[in-house]
Image (spheres, grey):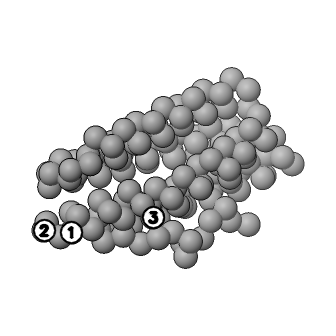
Amino acid sequence: MELITANNIPGVALDFMNHDHQEATVLANSLYQLIETAREDRSALERISSELTALYQHNAEHFAREEAEMQRYGFPPYDCHKGEHERVLEEMRVVLGRWEAEQDLDQLHGYLVDTMLPWFINHIGTMDTVTAMFISNQK
C-alpha cells in the first residue's frame, strides 16, 4: 500500500520541481512501507532511520534549489516561501530526533500521514505553484 500516488501530486510549471516532488513521493512511500513492515518485523526499525534521514536530506536539497531559483528571478514573496521551508525542515529535525530517541512507530506514522502529507500537497498546490508560474514566466 502506498501513502500517496503520483496522480495525487499537483504538477507545477517547472520540471525540476516536478521531478523533486516525485522523488519525495517515492521516499515518503518507502518510509510508510517501512513503518508498516516494522509493526511485524522489528528489524526494519534501523532502515526507518535511514529512510527518514534521506527524506529530510532530499527536502533540504530541494528547498535549496527552489530558493536559488527564487533569488535568481527575484520572486517577491521569497522570504515567506523560504520561511516555510525553514519551518518544515526544523519540524523534520524534531521528528527525526524524536524517532532516534523513542522509535515510536505510531508517532512517526501520525506525522507522516497527518502532518507531512497534507502539508506537502497543500504546499505544492499553493506556494510552489505560484513560485513555478512566476519563474517560468520570467524565463
Instruction: Tell me the element at label 3.
Output: helix
Q: Is residue 45 above or below residue 34?
A: above
Using the image as rendered, state which of residue 5 and residue 80 is in the foreground. Answer: 80
Using the image as rendered, state which of residue 14 and residue 51 is in the foreground. Answer: 14
- Give the amino acid at mark 2: Lys
- Give the amino acid at mark 1: Ser
* Residue that badge 1 annotates: 136
Q: Residue at x 14, y 55 (%)?
A: 73
Instruction: Tell me the element at label 1.
Output: helix
* Residue that badge 3 annotates: 125
Residue 135: quadrant of the picture: bottom left
Would residue 51 be found to the left or right of residue 19 on screen?
right
Mark 3: give few (<14), some (14-19) or many (20+) Cα within 10 Å.
some
Name the spot of residue 120 as percent of width and height, x first.
52, 55
**Which dot marks residue 139?**
2
Q: Residue at x 86, y 48 (%)?
A: 40
Q: Are marks 2 and 1 in contact (CB under 8 Å)?
A: yes
- Give the amino acid at mark 3: Gly
Residue 103: quadrant of the picture: top right
Quadrant in the picture for the N terminus? bottom right
